[in-house]
Image (spheres, rainbow, N blue to C red):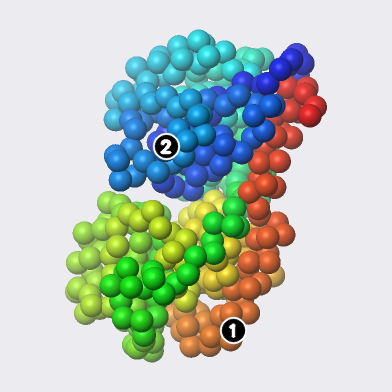
Amino acid sequence: MMPTINGPCRIALVITELEPGGAERCLVHLATGLPPELFETTVYCLAARPATDQDLLVRRLEQQAIPTHFLNARTIWQAPATLARLRRMLRDHDPDIVQSFLFHANVLSALAVGGRERPALFTGVRVADPSRWRQRVEAWTSRRARQIVCVSRDVADFCREQAAFPRDKLCVIPNGIDLTTYQPTSRQTSDRLGLPENRRILLFVGRLHRQKAVDWLLDQSPQFLARLPQHDLILAGDGPQRQALHRQAERLGIGRRVHFLGYRDDIPDLLAAADLLILPSQWEGMPNVLLEAMASRLPVVATRAAGVTELLGPLADQQTVQHGDHHALVEAIARIAQHPELAWAWGQANYERIAEHFTLRQMIENYRLLYQQATARTP
């Protein structure tokens, strides 16, 4: 146990990058939500500042006067220099706690400060990543951490049973969401999307990366779109597979009914315009977009990736399918889209589930308790 701290606890939050994403939003919520009379927070980002059209989260930190430092790492070959710079910056800052998010930040933070009594190191595992080499590296470096914060029980089980993380250091703090953000109107959004008002929206939001399995979703799209003539499929997000997915949609003959929006910063508006969120991922941890959809009172069709059934609770069986089960995916999408009363009921139940168990206030309070226990402080 660290010595009792007098005055605000100094916290360094370390993350790989700050382009909009689930872990990045969690860090910003934590940095701006922890009580300032108890915590002084500074953010360290291993990468460079995001481009102007993707620096929304950085601007939020700046609006709240949270000190934010960019180490400008661009390739893995810069890791030794980045580690040396991070170690130097943390030594100068002299924090009481270091909390890292995402693989590269976890590893470099552990190498920079891990194993010492102070600062206390907390790493954060956000996904059940199937990469074996990443599991081995992160499991090894996590032994230097005070505790390993997993984003869901599924991720904790994965770390314990498959990735050989130290069992006694695992704890679970789920993501939380600000419910007040998800109350926009839908009519203006449909106009902005360039869709006629009589078109219904099936929505995917996420990075166009193999993890999200959008290619599998597109393969099944001709079947469910044929049964849903008033619906179009909207893909909001960017990533390395975008061009290949666009070609795939054209090849499947559904190019006019699949719309690639690219990166968007108006996700609450898109959710408000949609009938249904589809999340076909191969792996997850606790998908933030699912939280957002549930907060928007939307029904969902998602694969049973880590964290999904934990979020959906009693209605998980009705709104999830096994990844790779083509027939189940098509039937689940068609069922919800063709039965608006059912969609409304499940959407309302999803909202109530989030409001009871996964609010932003609950998440911040759980982190506050974790940090105060580590520093022997009480409010």
Residue 179 located left or right of residue 46: right
Residue holding disc 2: 58
Q: Earlier in the sequence, mark 1 or mark 2?
A: 2
Residue holding disc 1: 342
Vertical arrangement, residue 282 with respect to residue 316, above or below: above
Q: Position of residue 294 (x, y in %)?
A: 57, 65
Vertical arrangement, residue 277 with respect to residue 341, above or below: above
Q: Position of residue 309 (x, y in %)?
A: 62, 63
Q: Secondary structure at mark 1?
A: helix
- Picture residue at 59% right of the left edge, 53% below the top: 178
Residue 251 located left or right of residue 115: left
Residue 210 located left or right of residue 310: left
Query: On the rendered image, what quadrant is the N terminus found in?
Result: top right
Question: Visible in this render: residue 29?
Answer: yes
- The quarter holding residue 366 reads top right
Vertical arrangement, residue 124 with respect to residue 301, above or below: above
Vertical arrangement, residue 241 with respect to residue 278, above or below: above
- Picture residue at 78% right of the left edge, 22% below the top: 376
Alpha carbons under labels 1 and 2: distance apart: 39 Å
